[in-house]
Amino acid sequence: MKRTVISLLALCSVMGLSSCGHLGPEENSGMSSKKTTSSTTTSVPVSTLSEEDMEKAESVYVFEGGLAVTDRWENTQPAELDLSADTDELIAAMTLEQKIGQMFIVRPDALETAFSPATVSDDSLGGVTYLDDMMKEAMAKYHLGGIVFYDKNISGPEQLKTVISDMQQESTVPMFMAIDEQCGDNARVATTVGFDVAMFGNAYDIGEAGDAQAAGAMGRTIGSYLKELGFNLDLGVVADLSEDESGFSRNFSSNASEVTDMVTAQIEGLHESGMICAVKHFPGGREYDEPLNAFPEIGSSWQDLVEWDLIPFDRTMSSADMVMVGHVKLPLILNSDVPASMSEDIINGRLRTDYLFDGVVITAPMSDPAVRDGYESDKAAVEAVKAGADVILAPFDLDKAYEGLLSAVENGEISEKRIDQSLRRIIELKKKNGIIPSAKG
């Protein structure tokens, strides 16, 4: 069924409120790095702001039933980068702030810095559907590696093309433009009114038919329409198994061999259309009955996982651009409550060493209720990177996560060499797929 998206956060253009004491950003003189203090003012409907939003703002102005909210920060203006340089030269030229920023893929709403994290992650509210001046300043501050779009950020084909293009043009380093586009009820674009694109049945129905060619054709079709809209990364390749033969809409099958065939074909189809993809959720995950704010548990031994749940990952890892690590507890394997997404044993040990995966490792969304209830955003980001993750997806509090990771490097908890390892994987993947220009010569 198609859904209609109505944006409740009707974010107006940035208003010049000099009469109210609004200070514009300082001039950027030259190309060397420097600290500047800047502030932005944007207008939003009163009904969309929580008390936390109001407390976070530097100043608030009331006008004609709305509010103008000013947010202030110190911003680093780095030197211009030569994107055509080879990877090592490009990394060497980047500031630490730029390096850290490349390790984040965030919601568009996180760039509206007057909004609280709860507002950003609340999918029952309307969302950001275009790029405004406050968002541009946030992009300049955080140097982001990518943006991930959710249902509430999509209202129509032209809107989506425009906001993606505008964001890419605003970014110093071209970004991953990501979406979790699966099939059936789990397709954000295809199920939105106004998009004339093919719709597919749920993954389990496709898997039950046993036709891998159909999964490949689905990948090509989805990849093609995503590419046309401006996306370059699909987070929608699910290698998890269903719990039993009753099926689960986004999992292809309860049979590991059948899932392997479907996932292999889907990846090939996405690649043929020029789309990067992430395979998820390592080390396997099925449908769970746990409360929304609790980490699901896998009560299996590692050997049990190797012999069943991990088979689709093992057989498709060589073609995967990214592997997404899930927020699952593994008590028999880790002897701790740490989720896989923050476990060095799982990422650096099992995924990197045992399975020899040297591509980009991305976390599952860090705005997941279980993560935000159990960890502050800075702690979650730091622990994931220490465990071996390259990309933090959709942190609950972008500013806290970014500043926490930056501080961890500055105080020696994480080495800059470790950050450079992730940067090399991220940049190489972007170069391989033409997101960043190829090296000179």
Image (cartoon, rainbow, N blue to C red):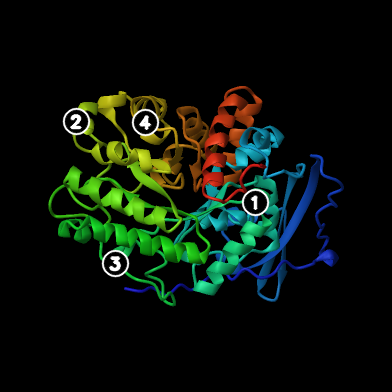
Which circle, 2 or 4, is nearer the viewer?
Answer: 4
Which circle's residue, 3 or 2, is located before the other in the chain?
3
State the SS at label 2: helix
Q: Is disc 2 surrounded by few (<14), some (14 to 19) or many (20+) residues within 10 Å?
A: few
**Marks 4 and 2: in contact by CB < 8 Å?**
no
Which circle's residue, 1 or 2, is located before the other in the chain?
1
Residue kind at label 3, given as amino acid type: Phe
Which circle, 1 or 2, is nearer the viewer?
Answer: 2
**Marks 4 and 1: in contact by CB < 8 Å?**
no
State the SS at label 1: helix
- For label 3, the residue is 200
- For label 1, the residue is 56
**Marks 1 and 3: in contact by CB < 8 Å?**
no
Which circle's residue, 2 or 4, is located before the other in the chain?
2
Residue kind at label 1, given as amino acid type: Lys
State the SS at label 3: loop
Front one among 289 and 158 = 158
Residue kind at label 2, given as amino acid type: Asp
